[in-house]
Image (cartoon, rainbow, N blue to C red):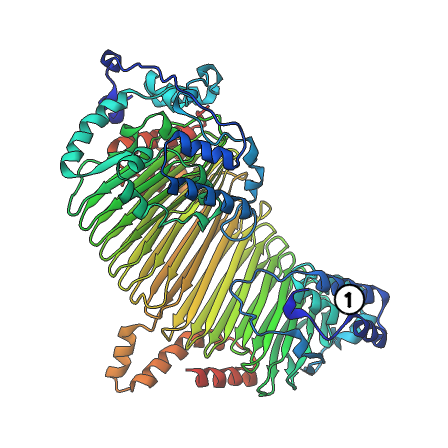
Amino acid sequence: MPANLQSTFDVAQFEALLASRNEPEWLTSRRREAWQAFETAEQPDWRRTNLKGFNLADYSVAEAEVSVEFAGAEGVTILPLAEAIQSHAELVQRVLGSAVQTSRDPYSALNNALVNGGIFIHVAKDVAVEELVRIRYHVANAGTIVAPRTLIVTERHSSINVIEEISSADFAASAVVLTGVEIEVGDGGQVNFSSVQTLNNNVYVLGSQQIRINRDAQAEWLNVVVGSAVQHVTLEANLSGNGSSVNWNGLLYGNGTQNLLVAPKLNHIGLNTEGQINFKTVVDDEAYAVFDGMVKIPATGQGTNSDLRENALHLSKTSRSDSIPGLEIDANEVKAGHGSTSGQIDEEQLFYLQSRGLPFAEAKRTIVLGFVGEIIDMIPDEAVRERVETIVAEKV
Amino acid sequence: MSNPAQNEIEFDYSKYGFRDEENYTFKSSKGLNADIVRTISEMKGEPEWMLQRRLKALEIFHKKPLPVSGVWANPRLAELDFQDIHYYVRPGERAENSWDDVPENIKNTFEKLGIPEAERKFLAGVGAQYESEVVYHSLREEWEKLGVIFLDTDTGLKEYPELFKEYFGTIIPSADNKFAALNTAVWSGGSFVYVPKGVKVDIPLQAYFRINAENMGQFERTLIIVDEGAEVHYIEGCTAPVYSTNSLHSAVVEIIIKKGGKCRYTTIQNWANNIFNLVTKRAVAYEDASMEWVDGNIGSKLTMKYPAVYMMGRGAKGEVLSVAYAGEGQHQDAGAKMVHGAPDTTSRITNKSVSKNGGRTTYRGLAKVQRGAHNAKINVVCDALILDDRSASDTIPYIEIEEDSATVAHEATVGKIGEEQLFYLMSRGLDEAEALSMIVLGFMEPFTRELPMEYAVELNRLIQMEMEGSVG
């Protein structure tokens, strides 16, 4: 176990926790495996995530406050994960752990050992739901480690829109969120999923999200990250089915000393799949943001059409952004490209706005909000969008 | 076949009577240890500091893990057996390899490229090239008048010990990577170049002209110093396949360009496909200096090479222009590194790669702007063609920006040859192979047009042969 993960929470306490949960045997044994992996894992070589000062002994296990807003519709089942484990055992067993993989690193292992709280959504076949499902995980107290998980499984030809926000109270000490999102989109269906992270600037976020998109299915995926002290989140879109597609947008906005990393991986596994990635990054003050992307087209991915765009905007001399838009291509009947830019505010735009009478600060603000607005406007829930806009407005 | 390079040198050298047999021979036993390093140093009659440097580098080499996973790493390196390699072979020994042992496909390629008989043996590592010495000696007189030094590196160390010691290993320290450490421990041959202040060398310095058997060594070490306001163009390699019974080539090239100086380094290498080609190349460009790497990679089993420019003075410029061609069983893992350490620096990377018959190309690049390097500009363009369903291509750029005033653009495309282009050419009467090779040559044209004419012609011919599947 890496030194900074030496926990006061030992195996005896872990066993006591398991005993208190009264879960089916398969889950108990998975948790044990994950705990063992956590205990024996080595510190991963994360060169772009600063975990200095992060010490697991400072936190105790708790559950995030969960709220769900949804009027309900025929064919849509929404349950606390703890209930779904009993009522939808087979589905949960299949999807749980698809994004958060025990073998990946000690934080993922710990995530699977502790996963507590969370929401399970199932949509029956041929059910199309317009209404937005709003999930919110809220971290109320400092000094806690929470591990909420969102699972979504849709059957064929069904569709649903979901937004998940992870937020926290405005405490001064830190907390840890081990996140996980695991989604399977059935044949010919569609899932629109927005993930918005608005934690206070003292929280650590470590986690993984994955969407598996089956035959002729589609996903609209949005990742907005404006909060936390340090974030390290792997995102994976698997275009597993022939003819599947994903349209994927994101925003990272860091200021102060925030260190925000997303690692989007787009895998074109099926035939004739289409993927579009469009991420924007803003860094100010001493912030450090990382876009560690990868588009993979294995030999099975003939007919792929893939495009990745990433644009970074620097607002201070001391900020840093890294961008790694990778491509790994083993098929020849493909069209794949990526573009990445990094720069500061366009002097000409600034000059133009100032010449129209806007003071410098206001002109700069207008330009930055214009840059991030394209992504923020995609947030489907008004209340969440307003929270993000408030945070961004404070940052600028 | 018309070939300007050939015309220059196609006359009967035998009448100059240079055929003295090199009969001093030494071949180190296989494997690597301190004794072998001592022997190499002793046989070369090196000063003590160089021996110590070699021994220290050997320790570093043993300590560093083989980069098979992670960043700037390749799993194929696991196939290397460091104990099954001769680390030092004296020139005469090379001639012991027999022409009969040279693989048929290499011989055929020589035939098709129109490489003269005498050169074939040299290129196949079975004989030294004497004729080039004539050219070299006459040019050397010209350079000496200007104060230009152009020697093999061993001689450079002997004749200019102080200049050598001042710069050797300062750009690429032994601890830089495992293969730089290996090279420092067992280096032999390579070029030592010094161009004095304000001197502009018109004729490219060609390693080819300076070549002796030793230059074909596996562990070449090249050191180029371009003084203030000086200019030079250095060319290494040629398009003919270089065959060697040794499976590892690991060179180090260090370049220093002082204020206002210019250097262009052109490489075209076509290693036989049994060879691991693991090269560290780096230049430091000071105020208003400019460095251009023109780098062509064809052949080898695995090439790992990322020419770098560290722009450490205001207004410095860096450029890498490269092509890679990966055929059957080959992996070209090549790219570029641009590090902006000073204000108003600009760099450009243009990479073109083609994979065919199960080959794999990887572009791996670094674009870094350090804090304080105001107004840095970086432009990166990578294009890859994948010609069949067995071949592959990766693009892995690292972009690290610590300055708000930097302007960075990276653009990459990967795809196949357009059906329409192909159809158009075939409708004009070309067969498919001809049409394909014409499109590929056009794709590589931004690179070839920067080459001296004779190299461009040879490279085009070689690519045509590769495309027609007629090599080997």
Q: Is residue A40 left or right of residue B115?
A: right
Sort mark 1 into few (<14), some (14-19) or many (20+) by Cα contacts within 10 Å. many
Where residue A257 appears, as percent x and y from the top left, is 48, 77
- Quadrant the N terminus of chain B occupies: top left
Where residue B274 appears, as percent x and y from the top left, is 50, 30
Viewer-nearest residue: A6 or B340: A6
Considering the numbered disc 1 on the image, is that residue within a helix, a strand or a loop?
A: helix
Q: In this view of the protein, can residue B234 be seen by the observer?
A: yes
Residue B1 vertical position relative to residue B462 in the rendered view, above or below: above
Viewer-nearest residue: A99 or B146: B146
Viewer-nearest residue: A76 or B192: B192
Viewer-nearest residue: A241 or B335: B335
Q: Quadrant of residue B12?
A: top left
Q: In this view of the protein, can residue A131 be seen by the observer?
A: no
Where residue A249 appears, as percent x and y from the top left, is 51, 68
Residue at image location 19% in from the left, 38% down from the top: B148
Residue farthest left in this picture: B145
Where residue B108 appears, as percent x and y from the top left, is 42, 20
Residue at image location 42% in from the left, 30% down from the top: B466
Q: Is residue B308 left or right of residue B150?
A: right
Q: Which residue is mark 1?
A: A31
Q: Amino acid at mark 1?
A: Arg
Q: Which chain is mark 1 on?
A: A
Q: Quadrant of residue B408?
A: bottom left
